[in-house]
Image (spheres, rainbow, N blue to C red):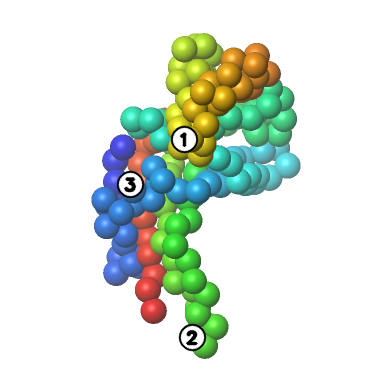
Amino acid sequence: MRYDTAAVRRQDRVLEESRAEELLRGGEYGVLSLATEEGGYGVPMNYAVVGNRIYLHCATEGRKLRALKNDSRVSFCVVGERRVVPEEFTTEFESVIVSGRASIVEDDAERRNALRAIVEKYSPAHLEQGLQAIERSLHRTTIIAIDVEHFSGKKKRV
């Protein structure tokens, strides 16, 4: 993954690369943004990062899959710590934005590994049950992989 902050307008707010990667790997959820025939579409999703790929899971049909057939370019945003500061009319935050290309994972071994990574991230105390759930639902689950081209991070502190 290439950390590239050249396009960040406020260079004084660039998030340190190590914190940006930590936020990307450990964030609670991310928002996948795609271009559709109807316009832009953003959807919050659970995910796991393995190597330079972000894995997401979804049903076998739907709006995001139709969008990916037409355009594989995606953006993925993770927001970390945030705090509204009413008296300053602002919000403290940290966030990471990924640019990349998404594809559907066809290989069953990679699909299982992606789902296992998601279970390990969100339900580590229930790994055995999670592995059983993977086997029960693999046939009706689509795995999307985002190959990260670059990412950047930004923060604001008051």
- Secondary structure under tag 2 reads helix
Of the two numbered discs 1 and 2 on the same chain, state the one appearing first in sequence. Answer: 2
- Decide if residue 77 is on the left or right side of residue 23: right
> For the residue marked with disc 1, what is the amino acid?
Pro
Q: Please tell me which of labels 1 and 3 falls first in the chain.
A: 3
Q: Is residue 123 left or right of residue 2?
A: right
Q: Is residue 110 above or below residue 54?
A: above
| Residue type pointed to by label 3 | Glu
**Residue beneath the point at 58% across and 41% down:** 45
Q: Which residue is mark 2?
A: 88
Q: For residue 21, which numbered disc appears in the image?
A: 3
Q: Pick the quarter of the image with the N terminus.
A: top left
Relative image position of residue 146 (x, y in whole percent): 46, 32
Q: Is residue 107 left or right of residue 11?
A: right
Q: Decide: marks 1, 3 in contact (CB < 8 A)?
A: no
Q: Is residue 32 left or right of residue 121?
A: right
Asked which secondary structure carries label 1, the reply is: helix
Q: Residues within 10 Å of mark 3 (few under 14, many from 20)?
A: some
Residue 91 picture location, percent across and down:
49, 73
Image quadrant where one finds the C terminus: bottom left
Q: Position of residue 71 (x, y in %)?
A: 57, 31
Considering only vertical position in the picture, is 127 above or below 26? Answer: above
Location of residue 157 (image quadrant): bottom left
13 or 70: nearer the viewer: 13
Alpha carbon of mark 1 to alpha carbon of mark 2: how far?
A: 39 Å
**Residue to which mark 1 is pinned:** 124
Q: Judge whether 28 appears above or below 93 on screen.
A: above
Residue 14 place in picture, x, y as percent: 31, 62
